[in-house]
Amino acid sequence: MTTAVHTDMQGHVATITLTRAEVRNAFNDEVIAELTQAFTDLGGRADVRAIVLAAEGPAFCAGADLNWMRRMADYTRGENLADAAKLAEMLRVIYECPKPTIARVQGDVYAGGMGLVAACDLAVSVDSAHFCLSEVRLGLAPATISPYVIRAMGARAAHRYFLTAERFSAAEAHRIGFVHEVVAAEQLDATVAAWLKALTSASPNAVRVCKQLVRDVAEREITPALVAATVQGIADIRASDEGKEGVQSFLQKRKPNWLVS
């Protein structure tokens, strides 16, 4: 049986690679199911400390597969709801994955592919890549990916690129905050490697807690309840095994046990 994605483990790092280069890594129900399963499985593994989402070929992801779109054209509203729910679940699983995630963008990103990049914690793009939210040209809207894309690029940029469907450069993607770094193609893997070194050197529990912290705190009003939650959060992690080990190893000038194992 052929698969739409390939998973590889090197040490504590898992790489999930989109392997449909012949269709610019466009996704269909098979890709959605396999990505959902891969991130669910890897997110639950104690030996995995970081996950890279990569792709083969000249494009990172061109959005929805044309054959899949042809099938959807005849769907009832109920079938469309069920189909969209699977896409939404895939994006949620990636976004809420307890492991840190990196989008390694080696080529163009269109439509639904923008959701994949936005759902990852970090994103680095080659300088030759282009980005586009093309849905309005087809009479559609980027509804399912919107919670993640708007968080990544901000509402003001989303107003422009959702409405105009303009194709924009990697430099512009960086300017609006959609990707964290833009590099030459030959520097892509070195950038990913540097991030992975930082992520895998950190306390796995602290990384997981920090991911949740961003989701809990971002764009919320600073209320007594939020302040109380952050106080509880720091108290809990200070009292955790890794929190104690991290402080003790620092004071004792030795490596923490998560770097020894």
Image (cartoon, grey):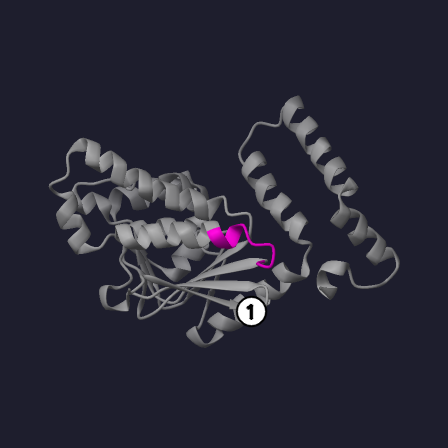
Q: Does residue 54 appear to the left or right of 22 in the view shown?
A: right
Q: Position of residue 217 (x, y in %)?
A: 58, 35
Q: Is residue 231 above or below residue 68?
A: above
- To which residue does mark 1 refer? 193
Total residue callouts: 1
Looking at the picture, tell me which residue is in the foreground, 22 or 36: 36
Q: Is 51 colored magenta in this rendering?
A: no
Quick one: quadrant of the N terminus? Answer: bottom left
Res 160 quadrant in image: top left
Q: Position of residue 258 (x, y in %)?
A: 72, 59
Residue 126 is at least partly visible in this image: yes
Q: Is residue 36 above or below residue 11?
A: above
Residue visible at 87% across and 56% down in the picture? 251
Q: Does residue 49 appear to the left or right of 67 in the view shown?
A: right
Q: Residue furthest bottom?
A: 186
Looking at the picture, tell me which residue is in the foreground, 135 or 37: 37
Q: Position of residue 228 (x, y in %)?
A: 69, 27
Quick one: quadrant of the C terminus? Answer: bottom right
Prevailing secondary structure of the magenta residues:
loop
Q: Residue furthest front?
A: 1
Looking at the picture, tell me which residue is in the foreground, 212 or 118: 212
Secondary structure of the residue carrying tag 1 is helix
Give, as a single range, the part of the protein colored magenta.
Answer: 41-48
Residue visible at 45% across and 77% down in the picture? 186
Q: Residues within 10 Å of mark 1 (few under 14, many from 20)?
A: few
Q: Residue furthest top?
A: 224
Residue visible at 47% across and 46% down in the picture? 95
Residue 177 is at least partly visible in this image: no
Kind of residue at disc 1: Ala
Q: Residue furthest right?
A: 252
Q: Position of residue 199 (x, y in %)?
A: 61, 59
